Image: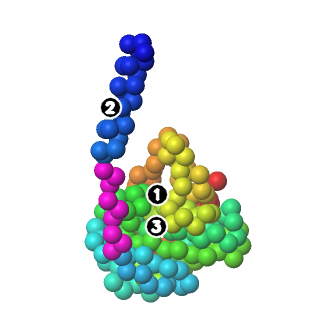
Amino acid sequence: MSAKTIGFVACLLILSIAISSCKSPAKPKETTSMKKIDSAVVKEPENKNTDTDTGKGASVPLTVIIKNLASSTAPVIVGVYGTKNKFPDPHGQLKEYKFKPKGKNLSAKITDLKFGTYALAIYQDLNSSGKINKNLIGIPTEPYGFSNNYKPKVKAPGFDDCKFDYSAKTNSVTITMIK
């Protein structure tokens, strides 16, 4: 064996030892309660970081209209974020709703939010994996969208890019999916 070959084999051996000694991160425990709202499954984190009280809903529900769905049957996941949540981190949501469409457009009502300032991040879970699938560089491979129809150019949007006020007068949000 040549010195180059021995050096290469040694590097491979060191790399394989280093990789095998790495521990994969522990999967977080599911610590959410589930309840049904307007034919949607709602996932509420127990440790909410928010300044918006969601104990009792407002008298006028928030209507979310989603257009341009890729599938008429795949579930649509709607993440709701308050001003103090980590937008658009899926682990930083205030609430998560799962709706089943019955066509290429969806109109859903959310009845358990107080009036306030929110942002929405949504995706259509085409393969029912329970998470948004992304390519190697982090771009979603499943249809997605944000409130205010924000279209990311280089990086994910911030809360201010997608925020809207939910009140008795403004209680509808329309989002067109990005495919």
> How far apart are labels 3 and 2 at the CA level?
43 Å
Q: Which label's residue is closer to the chain start, 1 or 3? A: 3
User: Which callout, 3 or 2, points to the residue nearer the camera?
Assistant: 2
Q: Which label's residue is closer to the chain start, 3 or 2? A: 2
Q: Which label's residue is closer to the chain start, 1 or 2? A: 2
Mark number displayed over residue 79? 3
Q: Residues within 10 Å of mark 3 (few under 14, many from 20)?
A: many
Q: Residue at x 69, y 76 (%)?
A: 102
Q: Dot 2 corresponds to which residue?
A: 14
Determine which quarter of the picture holds residue 33.
bottom left
Determine which quarter of the picture holds residue 88.
bottom left
Expressed as whole percent of the image width and height from the top left, the position of residue 105 reads 68, 70
Q: Residue at x 43, y 68 (%)?
A: 80
Q: Dot 1 corresponds to which residue?
A: 162
Question: Are the two marked residues, 1 and 2, in contact with CB atoms closer than 8 angstroms?
Answer: no
The verdict on residue 17 being magenta is no
The verdict on residue 29 being magenta is yes
